[in-house]
Amino acid sequence: MTEAEHYFTQAPASEHRERTIEFSAAGRDFALTTSQGVFSSSRLDPGTAVLLRKAPLPGRPGAYLDLGCGYGPVTMALAESSGGEVTAVDVNERARQLTADNAHRLGFGDRVRVYAPEEVPPGQRFDEIWSNPPIRVGKEALHELLLEWLPRLKPDGVAWLVVARHKGGDSLAGWLAGQGFPAEKHASQKGYRVLRVVCA
Ligand SMILES: C[S@@+](CC[C@H](N)C(=O)[O-])C[C@H]1O[C@@H](n2cnc3c(N)ncnc32)[C@H](O)[C@@H]1O
């Protein structure tokens, strides 16, 4: 990634340098392709690892959203565990391409739909939203993002978010509650909080 480039750049200019990231989730070993110019391109992000370990991956088909999919680790775990449909959203087009390619290679191509945020059909609602959200966009943009997507939960829906404690994991829970999305600390590990968020 170049100095001016963030992992949330829409069209990364950095050279494609592909590598494979291996991890286990949902009872399966994954080997996903990633590349420079996307979030955590050299290893499974430790926050994502805590999310996949501590939050209960769904065990039934439904409509799931991976908000900020990157190269797709959460998307693949959701597709594997649920057998349902996963919508994977990211602003970074290289991340979207990697997620689509990884899904195709793993045989999830017919159940994983990859979109830029503005492409998601407006009426679509989700049983669960999963996210390691983009903290680096800043608090205001993060709040806007969450207020855009959390209302897309179905009435009994639930969102699972992972946030580093020192990057505002605890204050985010309080803010969410004030916005009509009660959030409880479901788990804590290695400095990360896993928040369980519902609609009031
Ligand atoms: C912390 S990373 C997590 C990536 C991936 N889920 C993982 O666990 O490796 C957050 C992701 O959100 C994406 N992102 C940033 N702003 C976004 C927005 N407004 N809408 C959707 N995705 C966004 C970034 O490009 C990045 O891929």
Image (spheres, rainbow, N blue to C red):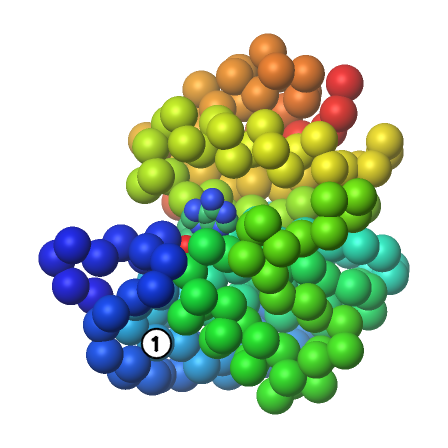
* Residue drawn at 50 percent across, 82 percent down: 31
Task: Indicate the quadrant containing the N terminus: top left, top right, bottom left or bottom right.
Answer: bottom left
- Measured along the vertical axis of the image, is residue 22 above or below residue 94? below
Q: Is residue 156 shown left or right of residue 92?
A: right
* Residue drawn at 62 percent across, 55 percent down: 119
Which secondary structure lies at badge 1? Answer: strand
Amino acid found under the numbered disc labelled 1: Ser
Label 1 CB-ligand 1 distance < 8 A: no
- Measured along the vertical axis of the image, is residue 112 above or below residue 141? below
- Residue 180 in percent (x, y) is at 68, 16
- Dot 1, how many residues are within 10 Å of its Cα: few (below 14), some (14-19), or many (20+)? many
* Residue drawn at 67 percent across, 39 percent down: 159
Task: Indicate the quadrant containing the C terminus: top left, top right, bottom left or bottom right.
Answer: top right
- Residue 188 in percent (x, y) is at 50, 37
Q: Is residue 196 visible?
A: no
- Measured along the vertical axis of the image, is residue 183 above or below residue 43? above
Rendered image quadrant of residue 18: bottom left
- Residue 107 in percent (x, y) is at 71, 85
Which residue occupies the foreground of this view, 13 or 133? 13
- Residue 40 in percent (x, y) is at 34, 62
Q: Is residue 122 visible?
A: yes
* Residue drawn at 70 percent across, 80 percent down: 109
Which residue occupies the foreground of this view, 122 or 60? 122
Which residue occupies the foreground of this view, 183 or 186? 183
Q: Is residue 85 shown left or right of residue 131?
A: right
Instruction: Give the residue at the far top of this rendering.
Output: 178
Name the residue that disc number 1 marks: 35
Q: How many marks?
A: 1
Instruction: Give the residue at the far left of this rendering.
Output: 3
